[in-house]
Image: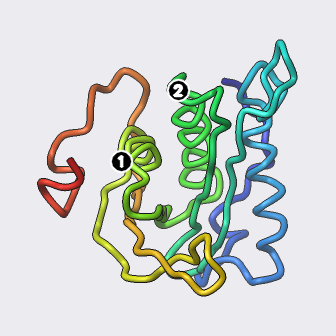
Amino acid sequence: RGIQVPRRRRDEVGAGGRAAGQLAQVHRDARLAVAHLLDGHGPRHGATGELVGSFGVVGADPEEGPEVGYWVAPWARGRGVGTSALRVLCRWLLVEQAAPRVRWKAEVGNVASLRTAEAVGFVVEGVARQALASRGENDRADAWFGSLLPGELREPGAGAPNAATSVMRGWPD
Protein backbone atom coordinates (compact mmCIF):
# COMPACT_ATOMS: atom_id res chain seq x y z
CA ARG A 1 0.00 0.00 0.00
CA GLY A 2 2.77 2.42 -0.70
CA ILE A 3 4.24 2.31 2.79
CA GLN A 4 7.18 4.67 3.11
CA VAL A 5 9.66 3.47 5.72
CA PRO A 6 13.41 3.89 5.88
CA ARG A 7 15.25 1.09 4.06
CA ARG A 8 18.14 -0.61 5.73
CA ARG A 9 20.57 -2.64 3.73
CA ARG A 10 21.69 -6.04 4.97
CA ASP A 11 25.27 -4.75 5.32
CA GLU A 12 24.04 -2.00 7.67
CA VAL A 13 22.56 -4.64 9.97
CA GLY A 14 25.74 -6.70 10.10
CA ALA A 15 26.27 -10.42 10.29
CA GLY A 16 25.41 -10.68 13.98
CA GLY A 17 22.08 -8.81 13.80
CA ARG A 18 21.13 -5.60 15.55
CA ALA A 19 22.84 -4.41 18.68
CA ALA A 20 20.53 -4.03 21.68
CA GLY A 21 20.73 -0.24 21.40
CA GLN A 22 19.22 -0.35 17.91
CA LEU A 23 16.08 -2.19 19.07
CA ALA A 24 14.32 1.07 19.95
CA GLN A 25 14.76 2.25 16.36
CA VAL A 26 13.31 -1.03 15.07
CA HIS A 27 10.26 -0.46 17.27
CA ARG A 28 9.82 3.09 15.93
CA ASP A 29 10.30 1.98 12.33
CA ALA A 30 7.82 -0.88 12.77
CA ARG A 31 5.20 1.53 14.05
CA LEU A 32 5.83 3.72 10.99
CA ALA A 33 5.36 0.70 8.73
CA VAL A 34 1.95 -0.09 10.21
CA ALA A 35 1.00 3.57 10.68
CA HIS A 36 0.03 3.94 7.04
CA LEU A 37 -2.13 0.83 6.91
CA LEU A 38 -5.64 2.21 7.31
CA ASP A 39 -6.11 5.22 5.03
CA GLY A 40 -2.88 6.72 6.32
CA HIS A 41 -4.32 7.06 9.82
CA GLY A 42 -2.34 4.30 11.45
CA PRO A 43 -4.04 1.95 13.85
CA ARG A 44 -7.06 4.25 14.08
CA HIS A 45 -10.10 3.93 11.87
CA GLY A 46 -9.91 6.52 9.10
CA ALA A 47 -13.54 7.66 9.44
CA THR A 48 -14.15 7.50 13.20
CA GLY A 49 -10.68 7.86 14.70
CA GLU A 50 -11.33 4.87 16.98
CA LEU A 51 -8.35 2.72 17.93
CA VAL A 52 -8.48 -0.54 15.97
CA GLY A 53 -5.57 -2.26 17.69
CA SER A 54 -1.87 -2.36 18.31
CA PHE A 55 0.73 -4.11 16.15
CA GLY A 56 4.45 -4.11 16.76
CA VAL A 57 7.75 -5.76 17.53
CA VAL A 58 7.71 -6.98 21.12
CA GLY A 59 11.17 -8.49 21.20
CA ALA A 60 14.18 -9.05 18.99
CA ASP A 61 16.98 -11.54 19.21
CA PRO A 62 19.86 -11.35 16.69
CA GLU A 63 19.84 -15.13 16.26
CA GLU A 64 16.14 -15.93 16.59
CA GLY A 65 14.72 -12.85 14.83
CA PRO A 66 12.07 -10.37 15.95
CA GLU A 67 8.88 -11.37 17.75
CA VAL A 68 5.62 -9.69 16.81
CA GLY A 69 2.71 -8.91 19.08
CA TYR A 70 -0.74 -7.59 18.34
CA TRP A 71 -4.26 -7.13 19.57
CA VAL A 72 -7.40 -5.92 17.83
CA ALA A 73 -10.20 -3.93 19.44
CA PRO A 74 -13.35 -6.01 19.93
CA TRP A 75 -15.41 -3.87 17.53
CA ALA A 76 -12.81 -4.32 14.74
CA ARG A 77 -12.38 -8.09 15.01
CA GLY A 78 -13.41 -10.33 12.14
CA ARG A 79 -12.84 -7.58 9.55
CA GLY A 80 -9.32 -8.50 8.45
CA VAL A 81 -7.68 -5.60 10.30
CA GLY A 82 -5.35 -7.81 12.32
CA THR A 83 -4.39 -9.95 9.34
CA SER A 84 -3.68 -6.93 7.15
CA ALA A 85 -1.63 -5.14 9.80
CA LEU A 86 0.33 -8.27 10.70
CA ARG A 87 1.06 -8.94 7.02
CA VAL A 88 2.39 -5.38 6.55
CA LEU A 89 4.54 -5.63 9.67
CA CYS A 90 5.95 -9.05 8.71
CA ARG A 91 6.67 -7.96 5.13
CA TRP A 92 8.55 -4.96 6.49
CA LEU A 93 10.55 -7.12 8.92
CA LEU A 94 11.43 -9.80 6.36
CA VAL A 95 12.05 -7.60 3.32
CA GLU A 96 13.09 -4.17 4.55
CA GLN A 97 14.89 -5.28 7.72
CA ALA A 98 16.20 -8.61 6.35
CA ALA A 99 15.04 -10.53 9.43
CA PRO A 100 16.06 -14.21 9.26
CA ARG A 101 12.63 -15.18 10.63
CA VAL A 102 9.73 -13.61 12.51
CA ARG A 103 8.52 -15.20 15.73
CA TRP A 104 4.97 -15.28 17.18
CA LYS A 105 3.39 -16.68 20.31
CA ALA A 106 -0.04 -16.59 21.89
CA GLU A 107 -1.68 -18.10 24.91
CA VAL A 108 -2.98 -21.61 24.21
CA GLY A 109 -6.67 -21.19 23.44
CA ASN A 110 -6.36 -17.80 21.75
CA VAL A 111 -7.71 -19.18 18.49
CA ALA A 112 -8.24 -15.71 16.96
CA SER A 113 -4.52 -14.92 17.26
CA LEU A 114 -3.65 -18.36 15.93
CA ARG A 115 -5.90 -17.96 12.88
CA THR A 116 -4.49 -14.48 12.19
CA ALA A 117 -0.91 -15.77 12.35
CA GLU A 118 -1.73 -18.75 10.11
CA ALA A 119 -3.47 -16.51 7.57
CA VAL A 120 -0.24 -14.52 7.22
CA GLY A 121 1.83 -17.70 6.81
CA PHE A 122 3.17 -18.51 10.27
CA VAL A 123 3.87 -22.19 10.93
CA VAL A 124 2.90 -23.35 14.41
CA GLU A 125 5.88 -25.18 15.88
CA GLY A 126 4.62 -26.29 19.26
CA VAL A 127 3.65 -25.40 22.81
CA ALA A 128 5.93 -23.73 25.32
CA ARG A 129 4.86 -24.63 28.83
CA GLN A 130 4.24 -21.75 31.25
CA ALA A 131 5.85 -19.33 28.78
CA LEU A 132 3.54 -16.36 29.37
CA ALA A 133 2.62 -14.30 32.38
CA SER A 134 -1.11 -14.71 32.86
CA ARG A 135 -3.73 -12.42 34.36
CA GLY A 136 -3.00 -13.45 37.95
CA GLU A 137 0.01 -12.12 39.82
CA ASN A 138 1.87 -15.43 39.92
CA ASP A 139 0.00 -17.28 37.17
CA ARG A 140 1.74 -18.58 34.09
CA ALA A 141 0.12 -19.83 30.89
CA ASP A 142 1.20 -22.18 28.13
CA ALA A 143 1.83 -20.60 24.73
CA TRP A 144 1.57 -21.70 21.13
CA PHE A 145 4.62 -20.53 19.23
CA GLY A 146 5.54 -20.36 15.59
CA SER A 147 7.61 -18.63 12.97
CA LEU A 148 7.48 -17.10 9.53
CA LEU A 149 10.48 -17.45 7.22
CA PRO A 150 11.38 -15.36 4.17
CA GLY A 151 9.30 -16.61 1.24
CA GLU A 152 6.45 -17.92 3.43
CA LEU A 153 4.42 -14.69 3.70
CA ARG A 154 0.87 -15.41 2.48
CA GLU A 155 -0.68 -12.71 0.33
CA PRO A 156 -4.40 -11.80 0.48
CA GLY A 157 -6.58 -14.26 -1.42
CA ALA A 158 -3.98 -17.04 -1.28
CA GLY A 159 -6.56 -19.41 0.17
CA ALA A 160 -6.86 -20.98 3.58
CA PRO A 161 -3.81 -22.44 5.30
CA ASN A 162 -3.63 -26.21 5.01
CA ALA A 163 -2.72 -28.89 7.53
CA ALA A 164 0.97 -28.47 6.64
CA THR A 165 1.03 -25.05 8.37
CA SER A 166 1.04 -26.77 11.73
CA VAL A 167 3.79 -29.02 12.92
CA MET A 168 1.26 -30.19 15.48
CA ARG A 169 -1.22 -31.73 13.05
CA GLY A 170 -4.77 -32.02 14.24
CA TRP A 171 -4.73 -29.21 16.80
CA PRO A 172 -6.22 -26.86 17.65
CA ASP A 173 -9.67 -27.75 16.40
Identify the residue position indicated by label 1 in the image.
152
Q: Whole-percent x and y of residue 42? A: 80, 33
Choose top left, top right, bottom left or bottom right for residue 58.
Answer: bottom right
Identify the residue position indicated by label 2 in the image.
80
Looking at the image, how many numbered discs can be counted on the residues? 2
Q: Whole-percent x and y of residue 90? A: 55, 49
Please indicate whether residue 30 sits to the left or right of residue 61 in the image: right
Q: Nearer the viewer, mark 1 or mark 2?
A: 2
Q: Whole-percent x and y of residue 52? A: 72, 33
**What amino acid does circle 1 point to?**
Glu
Residue drawn at (54%, 54%), measured in percent from left and top? Answer: 94
**What amino acid does circle 2 point to?**
Gly
Please indicate whether residue 115 sits to the left or right of residue 141 in the image: left
Q: Secondary structure at mark 1?
A: loop
Q: How far apart, in angstroms, are the residues tagged by discs 1 and 2?
A: 19 Å
Q: Is residue 23 above or below residue 54?
A: below
Packing grade of label 2 (10 A; few <14, some 14-19, many >=20) is some
Residue drawn at (76%, 83%), measured in percent from left and top? Answer: 20
Q: Whole-percent x and y of residue 56? A: 69, 54
Q: Earlier in the sequence, mark 1 or mark 2?
A: 2
Q: Is residue 115 above or below residue 131?
A: above
Snapshot colouring: rainbow
Q: Which mark is residue 21?
A: none
Q: State if disc 2 and disc 1 touch (CB < 8 Å).
A: no
Q: Is residue 163 above or below residue 149?
A: above
